[in-house]
Image: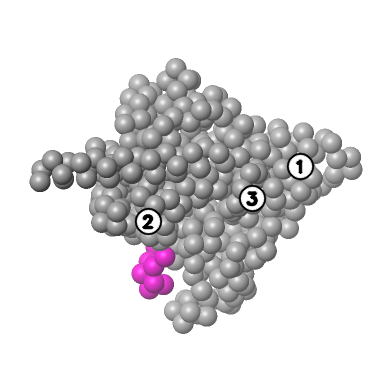
């Protein structure tokens, strides 16, 4: 009997690994391009004028008590769905204003993830399959933005500027000449980015691609200048582009029976959750640990006691082996990462044990040109108790950005996902 069980276990493991190979190959075959910028109402499948999207697994409205609540209320007022925060709250309680999870709408959102109908979203398409994903445009420089849970006239004025001037200028360029994204991401890694906490090189490369296209277009005036000024000052503008690209890539691995490849990591303001290929559409979730326990770098006078989780789908970068998982690529981030550049190299090197392969073109010079750890395996993560860490923005409970933290997500969802897969095979 023991021998029979051993054979069965070996057969199941072989089946899982074969499914994982198929999932990873689907991810590797993607060629994401930024093709357009459109209002969410036009670009996001299922979006309505009364819908507001947020990051992470969806909760009941009454369960939102922190930054995401502030951001949603602010979006409702900005969109004209309510005249006051109190009215917005009442309409959200009644369901007249509908909440949605970005991932359920083929989208991803940074931090709170808030996105309403008129807000411009970046549209990324896989050139081969036609699969698309969206992410709302970054709000630019400063520590006060709706996606950080901030509200007020200055926040709204900035949203209007991006919607009415910056987004249309970028859209016009992209419709004539889409921008391939993997070459920018590969070059940025070689220049010291890890493509989550550090986007410096990627932002410059993307701006150069936009500028090159502007120079081909005689007669561009104030709108082009507004776009270039935005790209100069919005430090993390490329993160939102990369997030949509990562979503397009990861979605290619969805729904492969038996596969334990992680297709999403995300959080709302209260829980961390993961999805795996072989259990499509299901979040495996667990409560978030106290935020004060994580290292990072905060802007004076803020301390960890002032922080609150705001959610975030940007963990899609670590899902692909980028961001914190590729810490070795970005030694300049050591003050907000695990520690020294040497420790960052050790961290990334350790994660090859929970990855299915290495990416053939997204490479890390500090590791001798090894590809980033690619195809994170929930079963391996659970078995080795080794969770890919995350470089993420630190937000204040009262709204606003306070710096950055090095966040290690809880292990339990990976265990739960692995056990669920075993139960259905």
Nearest to the observer: residue 144 or residue 362: 362
**Residue at image x 65%, y 57%?**
120
Q: Earlier in the sequence, mark 3 or mark 2?
A: 3
- Labels 1, 2: front one: 2
Residue 25: % across, % down: 49, 39
* Rendering quarter of residue 380: top left
Image location (x, y in percent) of residue 351: 34, 32
- Which residue corresponds to mark 3? 130
Task: State the SS at label 3.
Answer: loop
Q: Is residue 318 visible?
A: no
User: Which element type, helix, strand or loop, lies under badge 1?
Assistant: loop
Q: Which residue is mark 2?
A: 279
Q: Is residue 367 left or right of residue 106?
A: left
For label 1, the residue is 177
Q: Report, in whole angstroms, how far the alpha carbon at label 3 lies from the one at label 2.
A: 23 Å
Name the image quarter holding residue 39.
Answer: bottom right
Q: In the displayed structure, would residue 245 be above or below residue 117? A: above
Q: Which residues are magenta?
A: 58-66
Please tell me which residue lies in front, 416 or 217.
416
Whether residue 258 is situated above or below residue 195 in the rendered picture:
below
* Residue visible at 10% across and 46% down in the picture: 1
Q: Is residue 364 magenta?
A: no
The residue sitting at the top extreme is 368
* Residues marked 3 and 1 touching at CB (< 8 Å): no
Say whether disc 1 or disc 2 marks the residue closer to the N-terminus. Answer: 1
Question: What is the chief secondary structure element of the magenta stretch?
Answer: loop
């Amino acid at each position: 009997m023991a021998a029979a069980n051993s054979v069965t276990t070996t057969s199941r493991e072989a089946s899982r690994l074969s499914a994982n190979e198929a999932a990873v190959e689907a991810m590797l075959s993607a060629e994401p391009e930024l093709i357009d910028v459109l209002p969410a109402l036009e670009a996001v499948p299922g979006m309505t004028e009364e819908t507001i999207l947020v990051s992470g697994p969806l909760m009941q409205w009454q369960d939102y008590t922190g930054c995401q609540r502030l951001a949603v209320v602010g979006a409702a007022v900005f969109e004209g769905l309510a005249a006051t925060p109190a009215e917005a709250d009442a309409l959200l309680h009644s369901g007249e204003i509908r909440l949605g999870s970005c991932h359920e709408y083929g989208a991803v959102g940074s931090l709170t993830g808030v996105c309403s109908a008129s807000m411009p979203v970046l549209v990324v398409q896989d050139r081969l399959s036609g699969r698309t994903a969206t992410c709302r445009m970054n709000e630019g420089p400063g520590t006060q933005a709706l996606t950080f849970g901030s509200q007020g006239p200055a926040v709204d004025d900035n949203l209007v500027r991006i919607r009415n001037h910056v987004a249309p200028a970028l859209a016009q360029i992209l419709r004539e000449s889409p921008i391939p994204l993997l070459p920018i991401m590969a070059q940025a890694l070689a220049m010291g980015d890890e493509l989550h906490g550090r986007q410096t090189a990627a932002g410059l490369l993307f701006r150069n691609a936009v500028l090159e296209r502007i120079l081909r277009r005689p007669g561009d005036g104030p709108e082009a200048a507004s776009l270039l000024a935005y790209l100069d000052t919005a430090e993390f503008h490329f993160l939102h582009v990369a997030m949509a690209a990562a979503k397009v890539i990861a979605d290619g691995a969805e729904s492969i029976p038996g596969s334990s490849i992680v297709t999403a990591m995300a959080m709302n303001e209260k829980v961390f959750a993961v999805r795996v290929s072989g259990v499509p559409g299901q979040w495996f979730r667990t409560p978030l640990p106290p935020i004060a326990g994580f290292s990072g770098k905060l802007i004076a006078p803020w301390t960890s006691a002032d922080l609150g989780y705001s959610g975030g789908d940007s963990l899609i970068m670590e899902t692909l082996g980028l961001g914190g998982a590729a810490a070795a690529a970005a030694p300049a981030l050591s003050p907000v990462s695990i520690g020294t550049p040497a420790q960052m190299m050790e961290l990334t090197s350790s994660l090859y044990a929970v990855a299915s392969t290495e990416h053939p073109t997204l490479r890390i010079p500090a590791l001798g040109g090894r590809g980033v750890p690619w195809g994170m395996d929930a079963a391996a993560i659970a078995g080795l108790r080794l969770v890919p860490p995350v470089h993420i923005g630190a937000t204040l409970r009262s709204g606003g950005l306070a710096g950055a933290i090095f966040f290690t997500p809880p292990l339990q969802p990976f265990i739960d996902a692995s056990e669920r897969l075993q139960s259905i095979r």
